[in-house]
Image (cartoon, rainbow, N blue to C red):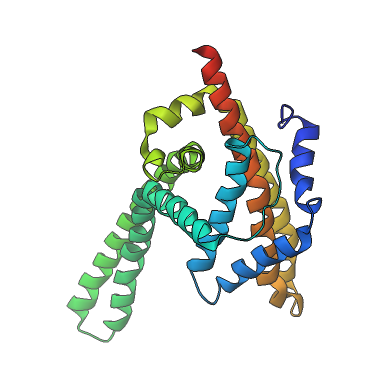
Amino acid sequence: MQKTYSLEGVQAILAYPFKAPGWQSKLLVGAALFFANYIIPIVPGILITGYFAKIMRNVIVDQAEPALPEWDDWGTLFKRGFKVTCAAAIYLMPAMILLIGGYLVMYIPLIVESFSSGSTTSLHTSMSGFSVLGVLLGMAMFFLGFILYIPLSLMLPPAITHLVAKDSFAAAFHIRAWWAIFRANLAGFFTAAAVIIGVYTILFLCVYIFYFTIILCFLLPIGMSVIVIYLTAVSAPLLGEAYRKGVENLAAKA
């Protein structure tokens, strides 16, 4: 995949899910799993993440062309998906604590004040001041969380690809190792991220049109299920190739 980030290479990555043998059933299984996530949370998402890791390993370890693998060996899919999910959660945890904490700090005092509206004037006045303080503090926490989320999310692609390549949870936190690979192919990682974000934005806007119609709005969860499994299929080889190229560039410099 020497031309992965050329126009032809990107087009090939975006089109390959529709050219694999039995692609209809493979994408259907993935979409059904994501839809099941609305009913039984977490477990279906972990399996989809494991499928993402399986596609990526084929690109990194086997150096194969992108292909949709079979939905089999569910135990391995769950194990790898669980590793990736936990690693991503740990990386994003500081930002998520600030974001969620900011919401709570903003809205809990307002809720308490609404229940104390019939209380004495002095108590209501003190609660109003407490609510204002809570809103200001919550906004500050939310802002810091958002600022922190950006660099942490940028660390995820090289960390997760390193985890998948080594098939080791601890590898995601070998920062010196994956940072060297990341630096060796910065352009590749950022190109992959730009393509993924661009495709997601376009597809999301197309499906979001359903939201503005009374009848089609019920199809929004189905549309999102299709988007997620398609992005899973295309983002895995894009990031996998960025990692593989980074390893090659690093070896060439040695």
Q: Residue furthest bottom?
A: 118
Q: Is residue 197 at least partly visible in the picture?
A: no
Q: Which of 204 and 4 is in front in this view?
A: 4
Q: Which residue is drawn at 45% across and 24% down?
A: 180
Instruction: Identify whether 28 is placed above or below 181.
Output: below
Instruction: Identify whether 156 is placed above or below 33.
Output: above
Q: Which of 153 and 83 is in front in this view?
A: 83
Task: From the top left corner, tell me how far across and down residue 35 is, in percent.
Answer: 62, 71
Task: From the top left corner, tell me how far across and down residue 30 is, in percent.
Answer: 65, 63
**Residue 135 left/right relative to 251:** left
Q: Which residue is drawn at 41% across and 49% down?
A: 87
Based on the displayed image, in which of its 4 quarters is residue 21 positioned? bottom right
Q: Which of 101 and 86 is in front in this view?
A: 86
Q: Which residue lies furthest to the front in this view?
A: 73
Q: Which residue lies furthest to the top in this view?
A: 254
Instruction: Identify whether 32 is placed above or below 75.
Output: below
Q: Residue at x 65, y 39 (%)?
A: 238
Q: Is residue 53 at least partly visible in the picture?
A: yes
Q: Indicate the quadrant containing the N terminus: top left, top right, bottom left or bottom right.
A: top right
Q: Nearer the viewer, residue 58 or 82?
A: 58
Q: Which residue is drawn at 57% across and 36% down?
A: 61
Task: From the top left corner, tell me how far across and down residue 96 is, in percent.
Answer: 38, 54
**Residue 246 left/right relative to 18:** left
Task: From the top left corner, tell me how far across and down residue 225 is, in percent.
Answer: 66, 65
Instruction: Identify whether 204 is placed above or below 125.
Output: above
Q: How many labels does the image show?
A: 0
